[in-house]
Image (cartoon, grey):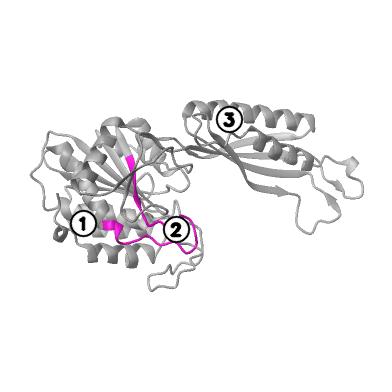
Amino acid sequence: MLDSKDIPVKLLTRLRRQVLHKHPEVSGYEGRTSERITNFLRSYRPNRIITGLGGHGVAAIFTRHNSGPNILIRCELDALPIMETNTFAHRSVVNGVSHKCGHDGHAAIVAGLATILSKQRSSLGQVTLLFQPAEETGEGAAAVLGDWKFKTLKPDFVFAVHNLPGYPLNAVVIRDGNFTAAVKTLTLELVGKTAHAAEPEFGLNPALAVSRIIAGACKLSQPDTKRPDFHLITPVYLQLGHDNSYGTSAGHGVVKLTIRCWTRKTMKDITTKVMKMVKEIAASEKLKLSTRWEQEFEPNTNHPDAIKLVRNAAKENDIKVVERAFPFKWGEDFGLFTQNYKGAMFGIGAGKNHPALHNPDYDFPDELIPTGVRMFHSIITQIQR
């Protein structure tokens, strides 16, 4: 178990606040963030650093021995297009962009592991610290896993953490099986024909089709989270006609629906039903329909061997464990890692009354940094014994 003096808390807090939180970048544009993380990692002499991984991703590889397990610890680089309302000294200096999901804190935790691993090179195997881009859009994990540079890493285990407002500060939140939901966004474009608003009969207005789709989506939902076939279909965007076009009956509409459920099977079943519904509605209203799937997140499935290591790590460090009854309804693209490798995601409580994720007044609690470092270090140590 790590001694508290082994974790450079002040250094990591400064990294999170002054280097990461203050200078956020949105998904796909994390170039400067990537450079800053790379410069930090170089100070701790990893055996190898890979940059440009799946876009702006960075991997620091600490090799102990030619044989032994390969462990990957993953965090995220991207921020959100949300205006920060906090007024503290390390508030975002980028207009309309801020770290409102805690990725700056997750990155500080994983960077903290680099400071420890640089001093402990006697164990067997390899540890890869992955700083992944574009998590918020669901594109980053796929880009990293599809990058030829990642193919050389071949992890035996993959792990990640997420801070969780609403849970006791520093409590570890665990769940067997799925930790987060499968999520997809469906974009529907409905094309009819514009007409004068006084003579809509000479056009094809998508308004009725849009209303039928929204009503049908809500009717198809099964929002009971206790059911294994839980699925939630949420209208998230609607565009019909043009602002100030009072004399024009719209001939074009766009609807976006986000679908989330617990399993791949349910996702397959419900997407089939949704597609059947929208095609029938569009045809009955004589509209041209085009569809596009976006921001796809696989369910984050915790492997029994991996989640056992997480539980043992919490016990080793005398950290309170909270067992989650059902998965979280949000998407996390680490799910693509756990669909391909033995792994687990766990949570660390950010405080019961802490502002929620994606809220404009949210900020990652720095008290979680040493807890995260200890948890990951214990997990690594168990595997490499």
| On screen, residue 145 above or below 61 | above
State the residue at coordinates (48%, 62%): 97
Task: Tell me the mark number nearer the camera, choosing from 3 and 1.
Answer: 3
Q: Nearer the viewer, residue 384 or 39?
A: 384
Depth check: give the residue in front, 146 or 235.
235
Spatial CA distance of label 3 from label 2 is: 30 Å
Element at label 1? helix
Which amino acid type is marked by label 2? Lys
Horizontal relation, residue 369 to residue 143: left or right: left
Mark 2 — residue? Answer: 100
- In percent of width and height, residue 261 lies at 51, 34
**What is the spatial separation of the Cα atoms under label 2 and label 1, in whole angstroms?**
27 Å
Question: Residue 368 colored magenta?
Answer: yes
Q: Earlier in the sequence, mark 3 or mark 1?
A: 1
Can you tell which quarter of the image residue 104 is in? bottom left
Q: CA distance from mark 3 to mark 1?
A: 46 Å
Which residue type does callout 1 highlight?
A: Arg
Magenta-highlighted residues: 345-369
Residue 74 horizontal/vertical position (percent): 31, 45
Give the numbered dot on residue 77: none
At x 84% / y 56%, what residue is drawn?
246
Q: In the rendered view, does 227 fall on the left or right side of 130?
A: right
Q: Earlier in the sequence, mark 2 or mark 1?
A: 1
Element type at mark 2: loop
Task: Please name the residue that numbered disc 3 is placed on.
Answer: 271
Q: Position of residue 146 (x, y in %)?
A: 37, 36
Q: Which residue has dot 1 on it? A: 42
Outermost residue to the left: 122
In front of the other: 38 or 329: 329
